[in-house]
Amino acid sequence: MSLGITPSPEMEKEELKVIDTFIKTYVKKLQEYESFNHSKAKEVTKLLKENLEPFERKDTKKLLNYGEPLTAQQKRDLEINTRLKVNTGFLSFINTESIDKTDLFAFITEAEFYARARAWSEREINRAKKFKSTLRLTVDKESCPNSISEDGTYTTKNAPLLPLPTCGNKCMCMYFTEVSF
């Protein structure tokens, strides 16, 4: 017995917009990193469009780390920790000379996190516009102590997109639409 709900066409349309915003923001963010092979932006976009589905959560690190696993010797030759699971496809997306060898996937994780926060906050702002509502920004004191002053209520016109510039690496800040009856 499934307890899941069947999404309405409007919900599906909204989710597809979130995915599209995520992909555009993610690829743009990746291009800010020297570790990313910028000539692969279109390929990453295509890979994401083919693999991201509405209402599913997929780890982009796993999507980009495809192909045959590198051997221990190949990893040693690249000065990569031999215990890391690195596949041949991932090598095409990175600049092996400039990547942080202690954390190969850090820039991908950071870009994914940023793009998800951005896409979700844009969705909440758009929902609030539809309902002619305000937004309540809840700032997580643990992950974003420098953003605590931003905690509060916003109109759709003055609500900043997340993550805030003062948010931490693992921001847990969230918008909630406040609907008045």
Image (cartoon, grey):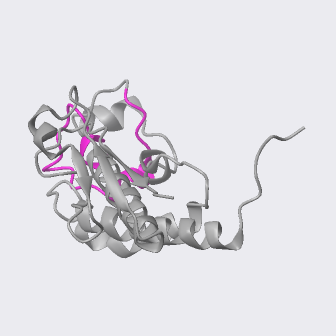
The magenta stretch spans which residues? 84-108
- Residue 53 quadrant: bottom right
Q: Is residue 98 magenta?
A: yes
Residue 73 lies in what quarter of the image?
top left
Is any part of residue 160 visible from this angle?
A: yes
For residue 28, side relative to residue 119 (left or right): left
**Identity of the residue drawn at 20% across and 43% down:** 151
Vertical placement of residue 145 versus 165, above or below? above
Position in image of residue 161 (x %, y %): 25, 60
Q: Residue furthest front?
A: 181
Query: Which residue is painted at 9% across and 37% down in the image?
Result: 146
Q: Residue 113, relative to residue 18: is it above or below?
A: above
- Check the picture and name the quadrant holding the N terminus: top right
Question: What secondary structure do most residues of the magenta stretch adopt?
Answer: loop
Q: Nearer the viewer, residue 30 or 77?
A: 30
**Residue 92 seen in this snapshot:** no
- Closer to the camera, 1 or 175? 175
Could you tell me residue 11's position as x and y percent? Answer: 62, 66
**Residue 69 falls within the magenta-colored stretch:** no
Measured along the vertical axis of the image, is residue 166 above or below residue 35? above
Residue 179 in percent (x, y) is at: 46, 57
From the viewer's perspective, is 81 left or right of 48?
left
Front in this rendered view, residue 61 or 56 = 56
**123 left or right of 2 in image:** left
Percent position of residue 34, x then y: 14, 57
Point 52% across, 69% down: residue: 49
